[in-house]
Image (cartoon, rainbow, N blue to C red):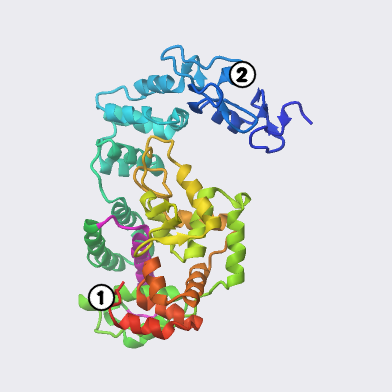
Amino acid sequence: MSARLATCARCRRPRRQVSKVMPDGPLCANCHAGAIRSRGQCANCSRQRLLPGVDGGGGRLCCECAGIDGDYTCRRCGTEWALRRGLCEWCHLGDTLDTVLDGDVDLSALRERLLSAARPDRILIWLGRPQARQLLEALATGTVALSHPALDQCTHRMAGDHLRGLLVAVGSLPERDERLARFDRWVAERLGEHATTDEDLRVLSHFAIWGLRRGLVTRSERSPVRDAQLTNATQKLRVAGAFLAWLRARGHELAGCTQADLDEWFATPPSTHAHAGAFVRWAVDNRRCPRLRLPERRHGSAPVLDQAQRLDILRRLLDPGTGPLEHRVAAMVAVLLGQPFTRIAALTVADVVADATGVGVRLGQGVTPVPVPFAAMVLELLACRPNLNTATNPSSPWLFPGRTTDNPLTPATLRKRALGMGIDLLGARSGALRQLVLDCPPPVVADMLGYSYQAIDRHARRAGSPWSSYAALRSMTGAPTS
């Protein structure tokens, strides 16, 4: 074995490139980076110090108590931390920002926010990327205006959106509904891909503005547009474009669409054809096509995980080797409690309740208890949520914080990461709900998990629940409508 490869003494991963040899053994690059950026109370001398060492029980030790040679004291401010040319990373970051933000535009609030990061090394890595650095320099000099429209025009969209989140957080830009803005951007840039003629593009544009955007604006006035609502709106536009192209292939335009055309479209796979319903209703209401009748939608049988499959997935989610903690907790809430990822992504720290009776999550009315094996996972996530060490998210309220200010991870991201762990969630929610309605009255399940009585009653009937008649009676007497 090469002298520079060894099993890391901290993470125990084999054949790691040795970054530093500590008293407890060789450290890989990740463990060494974390060790020299960890501060707190020394387990031996109780002083507040840099804690790069560990004792036999895993307690963190300062350099002197751990017997570590080396000086980690900043020559400018005296802070103990990882050094760059003798300066701690906060001082080095301050110097870097002074250079990057040198211009006539006042970005001092942004500078202070970036310097408040718990891990300044991550901000320095970000500033090392040409897209971020060049955009900051352009904003400071006024080459790029300090405005939402100007940032919308950035060639590197991720850099622009990340910086936008920071600027909104410090008050340099006004808040706006980003998903509504993404819808407008999609319509401007992508709608033309789904129109075969200029006339179809005009119709689709009117549908986007008056048939869809108006509803999104109304929702945005109550609460920010959700990812699912944005996806649903763009899906309706895609399918509307496909419907118009299909009509043209049959020799018809929208104004000449017949009931036979409509019936055939909705009767022909794929199932996404059903998304044309909103467009047809809008077209009828606005006299762009004859007064046609939409066929009754038929609901197919969704796949359902059986109890053995659910238990196998839940056992895998308890294993740290399956994947990162936050990914496992999100998948657990879907499989165990039957929650869609739109709700999981929206969970906040305040939705988790831990007391002497156990751990629970607010999903509907009251608190839904989390069983003991999984409660520990939730508590561990609360103690070490990801994405909090950046300047954008130092005090994020979300249980699953995203990388940008005041935004959680998106439902699509959580779903994708569950799939990336090899967890097949197809039918998981239905499987959870059908098992729950076998164990207790469906109205109780509905109240506990935040579902309507009617939705849970459907699961109860399909599961053959002995409580299904009670569910039907309850749904007729005071059931919530959504």
Q: Indicate the amino acid at tag 2.
A: Ile
Name the residue that disc number 2 marks.
Answer: 68
Quadrant position of the N terminus in the picture: top right
* Residue 451: percent from left, percent from top: 37, 70
Mark toward the viewer: 2 or 1: 2
Quadrant position of the C terminus in the picture: bottom left
Vertical arrangement, residue 97 with respect to residue 232, above or below: above
Name the residue that disc number 1 marks.
Answer: 283
Residue drawn 29% across and 74% down?
A: 481
Label 2 residue SS? loop
* Residue 343: percent from left, percent from top: 39, 60
Whichever of callouts 2 and 1 sits on the residue coming sooner in the sequence is: 2
Q: Residue furthest front?
A: 356
Mark 1 nearby-residue class (10 Å; few <14, some 14–19, many ≥20) = many
Q: Residue furthest top?
A: 75
Report the span colored magenta: 223-252
Vertical arrangement, residue 120 with respect to residue 315, above or below: above
Taking depth in this image into account, of 345 and 372 the one nearest to the observer is: 372
Taking depth in this image into account, of 121 and 336 the one nearest to the observer is: 336
Taking depth in this image into account, of 338 and 171 the one nearest to the observer is: 338
**In the rendered view, does 455 fall on the left or right side of 67?**
left
Q: Indicate the amino acid at tag 1.
A: Ala
Label 1 residue SS? helix
Q: CA distance from mark 2 to mark 1?
A: 75 Å
**Circle on res. 74:** none
Mark 2 nearby-residue class (10 Å; few <14, some 14–19, many ≥20) = some
